[in-house]
Image (cartoon, rainbow, N blue to C red):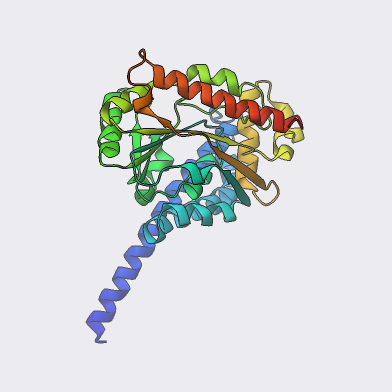
Amino acid sequence: MNPSTLCAVDALHYRQRTMQSADVAALTRITIQDMLAAFGLNRLRHGRRLLSALCHRPAQRFARTVAEFDRRVAAMGLQAAAAWALERFATTVQADGIDCVPQDSPLLFASNHPGIADTLALFATIPRPDLMTVAAERPFLQALPHMARQLIFVKEDGASQLSVVRAVGMHLRRNGAALTFPAGCIEPDPAHLSGAVESLARWSPSVDLFARLASDLTVVPTLVSNVFNPRALHNPLTRLYKKPADRERFAAMLQAMAPHRFPATVHVVFGEPLRASACREKRQLALHNELRKRMEILLERQRKLRNGQT
């Protein structure tokens, strides 16, 4: 190899390393901001630089893992990349009901959203390489170029809702698969926290809109639970926060930053698939209401399991 070629190769490698470092650096900065927010210190002015420095090492370690996950999404696909990432975050998945899920039709997975590793658990268990996911427009997700190609972003102000419905509908009409979180926000973990059933009242009726755009749509009610390690939820430091939501956010940050201290086994249950055509002749929002009923059934089973009932 002549000197000019060597220089070109070295320059390419340098650009690749620079791009990778830039991605990790951006993810690290965003993660530090999220950590400070979880600690209730995001508005702090004095001492912020020192606290950011203290957060830098765990944030960078987390960012490097996520950046490698994004690279693997392009190299091996979303499902395999998610399985790899779950191992790094000391998380295993138990999935039930996937054998009853259709593999070759327009498919919409409607899931609760307890946070932490729920999306990775779903990515690792849904065997559809064409899966697109409706996600909030967050800087962290936008900093993942390969993952972002499999996301349909919703703006924070809701201004993009119509375009999101159209994008999902177009994907479904092409026999694609999509994942949505109808609550539009983080919900209680059904395995450890109360309020999961009540959260269903906030679910968006968007499934009925999607069904109008994809006539042969199948909707799969999906329940994710046990994303928290109880030791993280009940860590003494969580008592520093009065609001349950703040305690849960802090516990989630503890678990994400020190996964091997707080391992988790996430449970994913795919409920009985619901054919949109079966609800088409019924009243308005029939599909949405039936979806909620089936989610309530899954949650009741979860409650009995948690209480040791059969």
- The residue located at (37%, 57%) in the rendering is 74
**Could one spot residue 39 in this view of the protein?**
no
Towards the viewer: 170 or 286: 286
Quadrant for residue 239, please give it.
top right
In the image, residue 256 above or below residue 278: below
Quadrant for residue 198, please give it.
top right
Towards the viewer: 93 or 29: 93
Residue at the far top in the pictured view: 283
Which percent across, then down, holds residue 66?
Answer: 48, 51
Which percent across, then down, holds residue 81?
Answer: 46, 55
In the image, residue 58 above or below residue 211: below
Which percent across, then down, holds residue 95?
Answer: 57, 45
Quadrant for residue 160, please give it.
top left
Towards the viewer: 293 or 47: 293
**Left or right side of 13 for 223:** right
Task: Specify the quadrant that holds the N terminus.
Answer: bottom left
**Could one spot residue 260 in this view of the protein?**
yes
In the image, residue 98 above or below residue 71: above
